[in-house]
């Protein structure tokens, strides 16, 4: 009996240590970035363009703006597609076609991001004959679609049928019922999932390597190579210049802060009223 | 959860052209078609990706045939390519990363779902799910500047001293290599394993736990002998999902794996993964065969991830069905 | 509340988009001359604020590839395109030499602070894997008096298609029959031993961080990173360290006999003062440029590069072009339509 209680206590401690270790990894990452990156973060970093090789100073302002542009485009393309697809799966029926759509959405989600970059290079960059923010946005949008689709379907399904029936009983058309009653009811959850999905791809580097490429200057319009935070971090990190390493840390801090902010904000402010612990 | 509601479709019980035009006027048909169009675009994109990969890799598929999959040379000058070192590197780093992450992650998941007070569990889970939000390039940063020196100066020699009799820990240690890549990958898949396993464990019906406890078992016994086996398929599914994620990971691996297309027994040796070689060589593959070989590698990777994802879905589906049938 | 915020963000981005409607010329290619190119393009932009030349150093192989695909306006390479490559090319770019540089052997041997001497046999041996340790006789015999450790040499080479690699392997092929038959020369070869790093920057970075390592980088990368680099024995038997004088000496012979298309190799050049692993590096410009504005600015840049640009090379440890070559190039610019 005592042995069993002992084992119980030991395993409780062990698993607690596992959980603690996992948590401490995040704390460590955050702490290191804050310390190392924070020292290099400055107003000039956020507002200046990169200096030529070998000169110290300069910043990544163009990369910050570039990332924002590309993300905006990715969201503008990917979110409506995923959303409407999710509406279809949740509201309109059928057996085989929805199954196919769900299956391919899962497949798309599983495509390695580098392969998406390859595909976009062949489909967009080569015919256009230049690297562009457009290509980068298209590549990232393909990664937004599956998560938005799944989130939308999940939260639309969680809306009780009584709402739908009520609306229809009052005489509205089906599409109106969906648009004015069901969707608003599910909006919180859908928005949470969407923002998290977009935030996740903000850190994606591989698809941008051969699509938006990089640029030392501001890129106007959508047809030019565009600098982005993840690509800059990658290029600077593998270089031998200490000054570039500093900047890579600072950029890493900026990127991580934005992503964590998006995650925390959506989970707290927009916390969906879904079921907690069973 | 089937939608058994009275939909507009039931109201329009009469079929025929007249009903169709009524639906059209009411806007329902338009809505239906619109959403179908968007949904099919998802299908179209995936199909297009597969087709494009297949088409663009035609040159090397015809030139090298099936031998591509088991040969080891990678010689851009001679136009001779073999995928084996990359397949090896991809699979070994991924499986090794699971070997590291699974005990840790499963332990954490068990603690969070079974043994911890709810408040602490929720707070810790929240933090762990934030880990999943850290972009891969940042793991790469930490890999280069912290993990590589650590592996080279501390962990490597320690492993060599204690486990050096195994062929895995022999040979020179440069800091970069298969083991370092595996460690970075394990950090990246850890949050997935924790959160999905935790969900699987939470899905086990309360009655199972209560029955075990009523029979006099300790919390650990109830967990290990009843709950975990009940949820094992879901947990297994989480492993496969994590594996699929690890296989496709590009940036962090590129930065720490050593970029050498070679197969070696030692885990300290530098290696190469499919995603890493595509990232390094794609923009500059000058010959058509080289480019096509890289795309063929992408196809291989895609195939691997499809297979593993399909397996994982089956596992998770099986758990859900089991949960509803309530049979151990 | 959320929608108006998004709206403002979108508006701001769109506004930012429209502001900078300058001419953008994109180039990509060699990492070898990246330090001087980035300085040149920055200076040129200061003097012509409406032109931006965006250069990404992705390796010579990448430059050629992207130029062929048409995704960049010009390329840059340390390996002149061979007759074969030019025949197959759709673009058939014109080669314009820009500077002279050299590959240097860099190493990180704890405890060794002096310049090490390397014979061609030692270099070939290290990269073939036949010379495995730092205290191998091949290295020791050329460095009497230096205490070399009994440690394995960690070889580091390029993982990407690189003109720097071409220069290095071209030199090895000329001086070692074994290297020539086993590996050959090229921008991406099948390395018998060693680890790969991306770009000159990557190799320099890895060598700096890895004890007992041995790699090859362009001179300026070794200088800027304060890394130790060794002397190489030239064709006349003298151990030469790479610097402006020795690199310029290597080009002396070629300058007189420069072919019309400027494609020439000067590795293992004759001459007592010549540095054996030196090379020109070229800008690859398409002979026909459709966009008139881009053509105008590219031509202007080439003129500027051959004039004031050449004054800036020495500060970054690149040797300026010999005067005969400059004269020939100025004439060749007119070939761009």
Image (cartoon, helix red, strand yellow):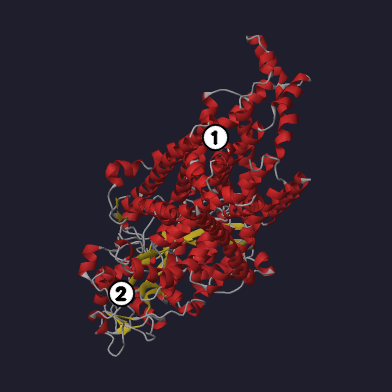
Using the image as rendered, state which of residue A231 and residue C27 is in the foreground. A231
- Graded by Cα atoms within 10 Å as few (under 14), some (14 to 19) or many (20 or more), the crowding at tag 2 reads some
Q: Specify whether C259 is left or right of A207.
A: left
Using the image as rendered, state which of residue B32 and residue B99 is in the foreground. B99
Task: From this view, report whether residue C105 is shown above or below residue B136.
Answer: below
Q: Specify whether A13 is left or right of C195.
A: right
Q: Specify whether A116 is left or right of C106.
A: right
Please tell me in which quadrant of the rendered image residue A27 appears. bottom right
Badge 1 marks a residue whose secondary structure is helix
Task: From this view, report whether residue B79 is shown above or below residue A217.
Answer: above
**Parent chain of label 1:** B
Camera-near label (2 vs 1) is: 2
Q: Residue at x 66, y 33 (%)?
A: A158
State how many labels appear: 2
Q: Can residue A220 be seen in this snapshot?
A: no
- Graded by Cα atoms within 10 Å as few (under 14), some (14 to 19) or many (20 or more), the crowding at tag 1 reads many
Query: Badge 2 is on which residue?
Result: C152
Quarter of the picture holding the N terminus of chain B: top right
Task: In the rendered structure, find residue C246 and report the number of the disc placed on it.
Answer: none
Query: Badge 1 is on which residue?
Result: B42
User: Does label 1 lie on the same chain as label 2?
Assistant: no
**In x, y percent, where is residue A255?**
61, 59
Using the image as rendered, state which of residue A115 and residue B12 is in the foreground. B12
**In x, y percent, where is residue C274?**
33, 81
The answer to whether the residues at label 2 and label 1 have Cβ atoms under 8 Å apart is: no
Q: Residue at x 55, y 62 (%)?
A: A233
Outermost residue toward the bottom? Answer: C145
Q: Residue at x 67, y 52 (%)?
A: B119
Task: From this view, report whether residue A42 is shown above or below residue B201.
Answer: below
Badge 2 marks a residue whose secondary structure is loop
């Amino acid at each position: 009996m005592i042995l069993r209680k002992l084992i119980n206590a030991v395993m409780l401690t062990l698993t607690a240590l596992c959980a603690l270790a996992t948590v401490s990894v995040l704390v460590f990452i955050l702490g290191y970035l804050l310390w190392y990156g924070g020292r290099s973060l400055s107003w000039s970093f956020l507002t200046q363009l990169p200096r030529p090789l070998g000169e110290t100073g300069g910043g990544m302002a163009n990369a910050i703006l570039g990332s924002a542009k590309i993300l905006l485009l990715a969201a503008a393309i990917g979110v409506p597609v995923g959303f409407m697809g999710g509406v279809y799966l949740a509201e309109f029926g059928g057996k085989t076609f929805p199954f196919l759509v769900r299956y391919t959405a899962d497949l798309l989600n599983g495509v390695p991001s580098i392969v998406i970059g390859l595909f976009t290079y062949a489909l967009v960059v080569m015919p256009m004959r230049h690297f562009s923010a457009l290509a980068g946005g298209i590549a990232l949008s393909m990664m937004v679609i599956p998560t938005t689709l799944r989130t939308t379907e999940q939260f639309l399904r969680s809306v009780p049928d009584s709402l739908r029936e009520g609306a229809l009983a009052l005489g509205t058309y089906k599409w109106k019922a969906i648009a004015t009653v069901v969707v608003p009811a599910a909006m919180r959850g859908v928005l949470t999932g969407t923002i998290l999905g977009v935030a996740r791809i903000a850190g994606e580097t591989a698809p941008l390597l051969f699509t938006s490429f990089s640029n030392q200057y501001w890129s106007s319009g959508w047809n030019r190579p565009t600098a982005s935070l993840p690509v800059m971090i990658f290029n600077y990190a593998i270089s031998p210049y200490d000054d570039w390493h500093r900047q890579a840390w600072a950029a890493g801090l900026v990127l991580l802060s934005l992503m964590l902010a998006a995650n925390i904000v959506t989970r707290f402010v927009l916390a969906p009223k879904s079921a907690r612990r069973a | 959860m089937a939608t058994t509601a009275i939909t507009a479709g039931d109201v329009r019980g009469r079929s025929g052209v007249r009903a169709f035009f009524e639906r059209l006027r009411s806007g329902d048909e338009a809505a239906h078609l619109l959403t179908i169009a968007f949904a099919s675009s998802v299908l179209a994109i995936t199909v297009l990706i597969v087709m494009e990969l297949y088409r663009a890799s035609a040159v090397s598929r015809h030139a090298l045939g099936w031998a591509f999959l088991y040969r080891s040379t990678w010689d851009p000058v001679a136009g001779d390519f073999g995928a084996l070192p990359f397949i090896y590197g991809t699979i070994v780093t991924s499986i090794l990363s699971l070997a590291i992450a699974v005990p840790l992650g499963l332990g954490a998941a068990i603690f969070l779902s079974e043994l911890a007070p709810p408040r602490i569990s929720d707070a810790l889970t929240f933090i762990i799910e934030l880990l999943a939000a850290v972009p891969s390039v940042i793991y790469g940063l930490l890999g280069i500047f912290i993990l590589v020196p650590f592996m080279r100066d501390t962990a490597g020699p320690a492993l060599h001293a204690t486990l050096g009799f195994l062929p895995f820990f022999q040979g020179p240690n440069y800091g970069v290599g298969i083991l370092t890549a595996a460690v970075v990958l394990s950090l990246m898949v850890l949050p997935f394993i924790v959160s999905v396993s935790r969900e699987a464990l939470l899905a086990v019906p309360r009655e199972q736990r209560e029955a075990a406890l009523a029979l006099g078992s300790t919390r650990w016994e109830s967990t290990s002998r009843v709950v975990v086996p009940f949820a094992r398929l879901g947990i297994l599914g989480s492993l496969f999902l994590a594996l699929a994620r690890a296989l496709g990971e590009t940036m962090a691996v590129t930065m720490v794996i050593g970029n050498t297309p070679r197969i070696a027994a030692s885990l300290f040796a530098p290696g190469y993964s499919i995603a890493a070689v595509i990232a390094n060589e794609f923009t500059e593959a000058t010959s058509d065969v080289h480019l096509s070989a890289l795309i063929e590698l992408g196809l291989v990777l895609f195939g691997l991830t499809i297979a593993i994802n399909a397996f994982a879905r089956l596992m998770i589906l099986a758990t859900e069905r089991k949960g509803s049938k309530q049979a151990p | 509340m959320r929608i108006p915020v998004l709206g403002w963000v979108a508006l701001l981005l769109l506004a930012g988009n429209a502001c900078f409607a300058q001419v953008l010329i994109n180039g990509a290619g060699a990492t070898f001359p990246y330090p001087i190119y980035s300085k040149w393009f920055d200076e040129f932009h200061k003097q012509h604020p409406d032109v931006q030349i965006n250069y990404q150093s992705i390796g010579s192989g990448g430059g050629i590839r992207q130029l062929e695909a048409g995704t960049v306006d010009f390329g840059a390479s340390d390996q002149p395109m061979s007759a074969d490559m030019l025949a197959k090319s759709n673009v058939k770019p014109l080669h314009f030499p820009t500077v002279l540089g050299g590959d240097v052997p860099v190493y990180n041997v704890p405890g060794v602070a002096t310049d090490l001497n390397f014979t061609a046999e030692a270099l070939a041996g290290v990269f073939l894997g036949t010379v495995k340790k730092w205290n191998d006789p091949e290295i020791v015999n050329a460095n009497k008096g230096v205490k070399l450790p009994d440690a394995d040499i960690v070889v580091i080479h390029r993982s990407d298609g690189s003109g720097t690699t071409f220069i290095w392997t071209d030199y090895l092929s000329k001086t070692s029959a074994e290297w020539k038959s086993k590996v050959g020369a090229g921008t991406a070869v099948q390395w018998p031993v060693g680890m790969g790093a991306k770009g000159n920057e990557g190799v320099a970075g890895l060598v700096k961080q890895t004890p007992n390592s041995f790699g090859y980088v362009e001179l300026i990368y070794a200088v800027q990173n304060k890394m130790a680099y060794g002397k190489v024995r030239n064709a006349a038997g003298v151990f030469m360290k790479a610097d402006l004088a020795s690199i310029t000496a290597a080009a002396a012979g070629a300058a007189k006999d420069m072919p019309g298309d400027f494609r020439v190799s000067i590795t293992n050049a004759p001459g007592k003062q010549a540095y054996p692993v030196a090379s020109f590096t070229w800008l690859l410009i398409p002979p026909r440029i459709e966009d008139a504005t881009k053509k105008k600015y590219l031509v202007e840049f080439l003129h500027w590069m051959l004039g004031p640009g050449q004054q800036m090379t020495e500060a970054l440890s690149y040797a300026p072009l010999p005067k005969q070559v400059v004269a020939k190039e100025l004439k060749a610019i007119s070939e761009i339509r």
